[in-house]
């Protein structure tokens, strides 16, 4: 018989450690190597949202940094989180632009809902500082980061937490999409409604090949156990790829991770979104700092973490350093070029064993003479770009 729809977990799922799941009968049953395993994480009991401030610790802490978010989008994001079903939660909002219109909205939500915790920065300190403050204040067993212009489905977080508990995961990802994108689609080889789980140290490799790209770029889009990231911090001097470095530090540890190809989060972009703002010249130095941070983590983890994860992040570091051609053409000062070259050299010293032979010569040249990156003709930069696209 199927498990009780009101049950959060069932023994048969809790004990399951298989890496693949196949959707059958409207996503209610999964087939594993040892027979049928009911998909209990689709049956999440919709309990009343309780106030975590009444002495009860919240199950989930959602950290939302806020900087000049348009009121309509901000209210939509906060309302969607507070309407979450099946979880007791606290919503930690970090106001990174005190005194602006967003501040009034945040104060309103704090005053009317005891689940809202409002932290106010003394001035604009950036998204990394805001997330670090939220992370330090979190009390939930589980942690999620969400942008202030995104909306989550009512059962989104409860479904991911139940999925993670069912497979004893430290971190789980779901499907986040732009409003115009399809909500049922095969992503990284995982059909809609199916899932993969794996260990970052033991694999299996086939599952990791599908899972790791779900985590690669952003910190939002899933949940993780707070204890798995408790001593991690975002790079505060980096304006982009700071979340990539944070997630890399998490995945380059011995963890159990998984992804569920089920839509749960809608991602919006507005004119002031960081991803749509033209990078400043110094941004390219910050990119190199983020890549170097990931490379150093790879170097520390090379004896314990699965090789496929190391190869994945080797390519990601190259992407961060060289994918944006504007980095070569940007009007960098002499000091900024030198800082970029030093960070790129340090990064590539770690990367080259994990990359194909066609990149070894250009990376060797970069390591021995990093100034060649900015020589007239762009020869070394173009050689690396060529090796990345083949």
Image (tube, rainbow, N blue to C red):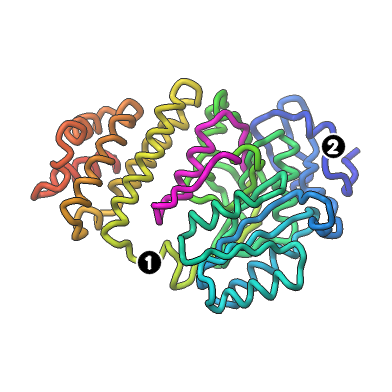
Between 137 and 370, which is closer to the camera in this rendering?
137
Rendering coords of residue 174 (x, y %): 62, 49
Between 67 and 256, which is closer to the camera in this rendering?
67
Rendering coords of residue 145 (x, y %): 60, 54
Task: Place residue 277 in its image quadrant.
Answer: bottom left
Q: Is residue 141 left or right of residue 266?
A: right
The residue depicted at 43 percent of the width and 36 percent of the height is 312
The residue depicted at 82 percent of the width and 40 percent of the height is 9
Image quadrant in which the C terminus is located = top left
Residue that carries the numbered disc 1 in the rendered image = 277
Element at label 2: loop
Residue 355 appears in the rendering: no
> Given this view, does label 2 or label 1 mark the residue nearer the observer?
1
Q: Is residue 186 left or right of residue 27?
A: left
Point out the stretch of residues depicted in magenta. Answer: 230-259
Rendering coords of residue 77 (x, y %): 63, 67
Q: Is residue 313 magenta?
A: no
Pointer 2 local density, CA inside 10 Å: few below 14, some 14–19, many at least 20: some
Residue 231 appears in the rendering: yes
Residue that carries the numbered disc 2 in the rendered image = 10
Identify whether 40 is placed above or below 149.
above
Compute the Cα span from label 2 to label 1: 47 Å
Residue farthest to the left, as pictured: 376
Image quadrant in which the N terminus is located = top right
Is tag 2's residue or tag 1's residue first in the polypeptide sequence? 2
Identify whether 225 is placed above or below 252.
below
Pointer 1 local density, CA inside 10 Å: few below 14, some 14–19, many at least 20: few
The residue depicted at 57 percent of the width and 75 percent of the height is 102
Residue farthest to the front, as pictured: 122
Task: Place residue 294 in its image quadrant.
Answer: top left
Q: Is residue 248 magenta?
A: yes
Element at label 1: loop
């Amino acid at each position: 018989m199927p498990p009780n729809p009101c049950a959060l977990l069932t023994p048969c799922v809790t004990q399951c450690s298989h890496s693949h799941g196949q959707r059958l009968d409207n996503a209610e049953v999964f087939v594993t190597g040892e027979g049928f395993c009911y998909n209990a994480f689709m049956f999440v009991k919709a309990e009343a949202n309780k106030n975590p401030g009444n002495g009860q610790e919240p199950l989930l802490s959602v950290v939302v940094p806020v900087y000049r978010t348009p009121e309509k989008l901000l209210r939509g994001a906060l309302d969607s989180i507070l309407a979450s079903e099946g979880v007791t939660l606290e919503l930690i909002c970090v106001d990174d632009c005190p005194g602006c219109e967003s501040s009034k909205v945040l104060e309103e939500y704090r005053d009317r809902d005891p689940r809202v915790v409002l932290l106010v920065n003394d001035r604009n300190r950036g998204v990394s500082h805001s997330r670090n403050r939220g992370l330090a204040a979190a009390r939930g067993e589980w942690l999620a980061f969400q942008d202030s212009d995104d909306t989550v489905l009512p059962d989104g977080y409860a479904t991911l937490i139940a999925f993670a508990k069912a497979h004893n995961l430290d971190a789980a990802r779901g499907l986040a999409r732009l409003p115009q994108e399809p909500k049922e689609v095969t992503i990284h080889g995982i059909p809609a409604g199916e899932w993969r789980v794996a260990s970052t140290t033991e694999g299996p490799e086939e599952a990791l090949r599908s899972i790791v790209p779900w985590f690669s770029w952003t910190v939002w889009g899933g949940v993780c156990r707070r204890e798995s990231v408790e001593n991690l911090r975002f790079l505060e001097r980096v304006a982009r790829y700071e979340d990539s470095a944070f997630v890399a530090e998490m995945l380059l540890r011995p963890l159990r991770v998984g992804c569920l190809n089920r839509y749960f989060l809608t991602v919006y972009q507005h004119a002031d979104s960081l991803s749509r703002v033209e990078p400043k010249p110094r941004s390219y130095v910050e990119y190199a700092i983020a890549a170097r941070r990931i490379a150093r983590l790879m170097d520390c983890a090379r004896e314990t973490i699965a090789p496929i994860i190391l190869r994945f992040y080797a390519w990601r570091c190259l992407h961060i350093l060289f994918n944006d051609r504007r980095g070569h053409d940007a009007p960098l000062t002499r000091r900024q070029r030198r800082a970029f070259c030093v960070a790129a050299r340090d990064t590539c010293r770690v990367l080259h064993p994990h990359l194909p032979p066609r990149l070894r010569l250009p990376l060797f040249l970069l390591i021995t003479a990093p100034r060649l990156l900015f020589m007239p003709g762009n020869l070394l930069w173009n050689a690396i770009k060529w090796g990345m696209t083949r």
